Image (spheres, helix red, strand yellow):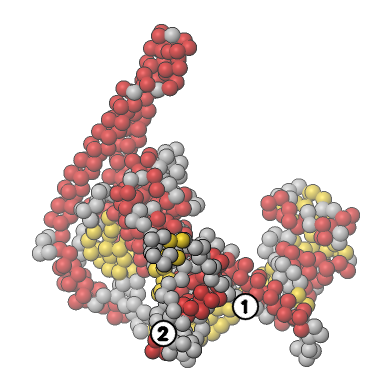
Amino acid sequence: MQLNWKGSKALILARKRINTNDAFRQFNNNEVDVLMINQSGSTGASAHAIPTAKVSKEQVKQRVMIVLQAELDINTEVQKRGRINRTGQIMKPIYDYVTSAIPAEKRLMMMLQKKLKSLDANTTSNQKQSTKILDVPDFLNKYGDKIVKDYLLENKEVNDLLDDPLHLKNSKTDSGSNESQTLEDAAHKVSGRVAVLSTKMQQDFYNEIAERYNDYVEYLKQIGDYDLEVEAMNLEAETVSAKVIKMGKGSDSAFGEDSTLETVRANVLKKPFTKTELENLINESLKAKDPHKVQDELMEEYEASVSDRLKLEETETNTKYEELIRNIPNEKKIQKILTKQGEGAWRQAITEREKELTGARDLQLQNLRKTFDNRKQYLEKAFRFFYISRNIRYPIETYNGGNELVPAVFLGFVVDKKKKNPYAPSAIKLRIAIANSSKYLAIPASYSEDIMTIIGASADVSQPSMNVLLHEWEKYTKENNTDRRIRHIITGNLLQAFSDFKGKLVSYTTLNGETKKGILMPENWNPGEQVQDKVVVPILKAAPIIKSITQNSHIVTNNGLSFFRTGNYFKLIISASRSRGGDIYLDKEILELVEKNNFEKVSDKMVAMLPEKNMDKLLEILQSRHGCSVTMQSYQLKDLKDDAITYSNRKRIELPPDDEEPQNEVAMLELEAEALALELELLAA
């Protein structure tokens, strides 16, 4: 603004546009305190905390980025944040994400965090980096899907207001059971509609889901089934033996390595409660009362609570349908009948509509009572069976055809009476002390399968006096628990092994101070029949074995393709099902190699004859295009092919011999870039 010499008039002048580099230079020189940037400021310029020609080290100020709206493209968001977080800075920056008080905005932050976790995993193999910058409860995953579904089953009014996003009204699932299949992306679908609820209901939804989700994740971590993040463990592992269980394709990246099963001696990170600790926990739960007295009081409270809640929901249902019946004459369909067909047809339509609504009300009341009865029957069985200090057995799968029954003691139920529905199965927890490294579990009552398994394993267990119980606990824990024990960890190519072995991704320490990543198998896992003396081998490396099979002998690949020797030919046999064998018998490159360029249908199989001279080319196609492998005995490994040519599912890469320099450095850089792109693509998948 420019004033005249009298100060009576002013002229507003157009602001001169400052060059981006000049704006950042002024900020770095402390000439301005604030920069406002958008997507165009996400690349190029730097604004991190460093001394300049005009700013000494003592004058450098900490950088704070206030983000009003996150970018939809997570790469742009990370680049934008990188303006104040760069190499050479003398102070770390602060990031503040501004959101409104509307609870539904939590979903936007969860989606941003989900993108950050994915990016972190792709670039650093560490999903936890993003939590240092953005820490919000994130349940947009497979575990959150289960929690959200259970919540809607227990809160019918919320489900109705959201217009039944998971189509649960047509489901026969009982609210007290967790055996039904969780719907994919349930958390994402439901949270997208929560914004239509009142602010209070949104807040209740997110608070309840976050609490249940945290409880569920904690339970999964206790039993070793949580697999969304790599867990850091100070095992100080010492390798006792190692064997290849799945051979890699041989490329230079980690995805071409072998998958190796290591038997290690590792630290036991958790130990069971001592005799004194267990006694204190029991006394704390009993509060100087008899265990059966506490049990009876819980049953009485539950009976009263569930009766009141049933009456409340029946009243709400009746009120809802009474209002609908009263409003029948105002329905558009009914009014249209009055206009077009007259009063007689109108009254008949009202009567029919009233019968329809009455029937719907009766059906809903019937389903409501059935749900309450099923839930009540299940919970009453649990309440009657478990009481504080009960001696029970906790079954642990041993992977050799049975379960190990570990001594355990029930410590009581946890019921939060401040909750809207305190006796919902998901809101009740069963506290159990276990005499092994699991130590303690708090199992939500909604996990009916786990709880019924414990009841079945503990039905015939004797109930000694308190002194005898504590003595037996002390004796068992001293005999069966040590500081270190034998564990099994899969290392090397984890990606190809993860589909075949159920374990936990961990980052663990070794005895010599190294940190490695691997798949830690369950505590009582025994290799047994799953490993035996067999190795999964890429089909191209198995070429000598396949070509050497004798007359009428055969080898079968992982996708069901069988090779039979018949003279100078190999008979190829695969399932005629398009979903199981179509990729093979419809592959044009394979058809060019077989006799008559065609597979013929014989019963439920597709059969073709392959000349022996075409075998090498076929094996190359099967590996590069279809990722085929075969399972072999360990003693056969010495006969396998050791080739310098490696293959991927994307493109064949020919590597020069070790003693030969690459003829074209640019070409080699391109190959390395392709390999890196493949690794990132597989990690994202």
| In the image: residue 8, left or right of residue 45 | left
Q: Amino acid at mark 2?
A: Val
- SS at mark 2? loop
Depth check, front residue: 473 or 196: 196
Residue at the spot 75% in from the left edge and 88% down from the top edge = 658
Residue 634 placement, left or right of 181: right
- Which residue corresponds to mark 1? 254
Name above or below for residue 607 compared with residue 318: below
User: Is residue 358 among what the camera can see?
Assistant: no
User: Taking 188 as reference, is 219 left or right?
Assistant: left
Instruction: Say what secondary structure mark 1 lies in.
Output: helix
- Quarter of the image that includes the C terminus: bottom right
What percent of the width, then of the height, locates residue 144? 42, 57
Say which amino acid is labelled 1: Ala
Which image quadrant for residue 350? top left
Numbered circle sitting on residue 60: 2
